[in-house]
């Protein structure tokens, strides 16, 4: 059974590109276009890994990660923050709220796939 990935991203073109690439790589993909929907889908879909943008409408990625981490069923689900925010303090904050990894946009797809594979073993 393929691993399930939740992608939470408000840029539709990037979301579709990520979705297509991950499905091609054999993953089942669930999508959300804002942080509020992302938190809801994380709880309802119970993905194996979450890719989370940090700057989103309705609920920031930082706040969404906090909500996900407060759910006992999702405490161990790996989260990769994927963001244009490249400052050290942004990376530190993402890790403090519960992200396992941090990828700065624009990113190399092969590097992102490697991180996903490493976290879902």
Image (spheres, grey):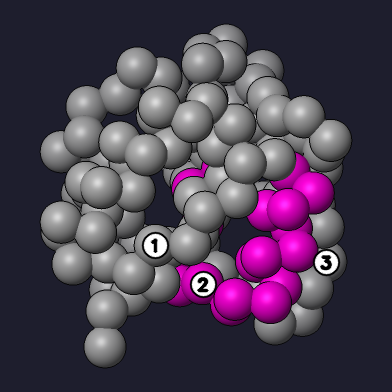
Q: Nearer the viewer, residue 111 or 100?
A: 111
Q: Nearer the viewer, residue 21 or 63?
A: 21
* Range of magenta residues: 35-52
Q: Residue at x 18, y 67 (%)?
A: 26
Which of the 4 image quadrants contains residue 107?
A: top left
Whether residue 100 can be seen here: no
Q: Is the residue marked by circle 1 packed among few (<14), some (14-19), or many (20+) residues within 10 Å?
A: some
Lower position in the chain sequence, tag 2 or tag 1: 1
**66 on left or right of 23:** right
Mark sitting on residue 47: 2
Q: Which residue is mark 3?
A: 70
Q: Residue at x 67, y 18 (%)?
A: 89
- Residue 86, how many percent across, how many down? 52, 13
**27 on left or right of 94:** left
Question: Magenta: predominant secondary structure element?
Answer: helix
Under tag 2, what secondary structure? loop
Under tag 1, what secondary structure? strand
Q: Which residue is mark 1?
A: 29
Lower position in the chain sequence, tag 1 or tag 3: 1
Q: Residue at x 27, y 66 (%)?
A: 27
Q: Nearer the viewer, mark 2 or mark 1?
A: 1
Q: Spot the residue most to the bottom.
A: 1
């Amino acid at each position: 059974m393929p691993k399930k990935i939740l992608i939470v991203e408000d840029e539709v073109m990037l979301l579709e590109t990520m979705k297509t690439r991950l499905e091609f790589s054999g993953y089942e993909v669930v999508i959300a276009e804002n942080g509020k929907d992302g938190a809801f889908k994380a709880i309802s879909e119970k993905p194996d890994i979450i890719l989370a943008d940090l700057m989103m409408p309705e609920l920031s990625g930082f706040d969404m990660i906090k909500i996900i981490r407060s759910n006992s069923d999702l405490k161990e689900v790996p989260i990769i923050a994927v963001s244009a925010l490249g400052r050290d303090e942004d990376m530190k904050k993402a890790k403090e709220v519960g992200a396992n990894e941090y990828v700065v946009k624009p990113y190399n797809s092969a590097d992102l796939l490697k991180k996903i594979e490493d976290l879902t073993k």
